[in-house]
Image (cartoon, rainbow, N blue to C red):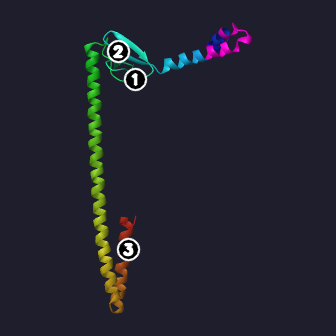
């Protein structure tokens, strides 16, 4: 970075202080060229290549480098290519196995939640029936038994986690 500043300062020293507009033009030209280099698109049509700051015109194909997103096979032996293919195949198989395991775990979770919901609904029905029986005129021994049953059912609800 310091070398770049040094070059610019040397380039601008050749102008006298009265040539301030010329300095501004040079700086703007340098900035324009720098921004053009960063946003260029490489287009090809046959043997012709165009460098543009916009999309390729009709008849031209964008061949701007994508940053090496693929696997290069240039200069690799057949053994290395085979090893790479085996590695990629094993990665794909591992990914499929992980997806299958995740799907199985999700299915088990759904089944467990459905079972819990079914148990909670059954306990709710028992509690309602118990409360209806408590509203009836009963002997005191029967009322004590109904209260104990009601408390046991509420405890079961809490242990199962019905009200979460």
Please identify the dominant SS of the magenta region.
helix
Residue 154's disc number: 3
Q: How many marks?
A: 3
Q: Secondary structure at mark 1?
A: loop
**Residue hosting label 2:** 44
- Would residue 108 be found to the left or right of residue 42 on screen? left
**Along the viewing direction, whichever of 3 and 19 lies nearer the viewer:** 19
Q: CA distance from mark 3 to mark 1?
A: 70 Å
Q: Quadrant of residue 34?
A: top right
Q: Is residue 9 visible?
A: yes
Q: Quadrant of the C terminus?
A: bottom left
First-in-chain label (1 vs 2): 2
Residue range in magenta is: 11-27
**Residue hosting label 1:** 55
Q: Secondary structure at mark 3?
A: helix
First-in-chain label (2 vs 3): 2
First-in-chain label (3 vs 1): 1
């Amino acid at each position: 970075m310091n070398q770049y500043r040094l070059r610019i300062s040397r380039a601008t020293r050749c102008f006298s202080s009265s040539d301030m507009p010329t300095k501004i033009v040079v700086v703007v030209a340098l900035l324009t060229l720098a921004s053009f280099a960063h946003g260029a698109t490489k287009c090809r049509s046959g043997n012709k290549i165009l460098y543009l700051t916009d999309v390729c015109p009709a008849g031209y194909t964008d061949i701007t480098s994508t940053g090496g997103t693929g696997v290069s096979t240039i200069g690799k032996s057949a053994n290395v290519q085979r090893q790479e293919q085996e590695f990629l195949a094993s990665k794909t198989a591992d990914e499929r196995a992980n997806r299958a395991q995740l799907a199985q775990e999700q299915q088990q979770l759904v089944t467990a939640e459905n079972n819990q919901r079914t148990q909670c609904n059954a306990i709710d029905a028992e509690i309602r029936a118990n409360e209806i029986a408590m509203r009836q005129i009963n002997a005191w021994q029967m009322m004590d038994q109904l209260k104990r049953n009601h408390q046991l059912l509420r405890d079961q609800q809490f242990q199962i986690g019905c009200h979460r």
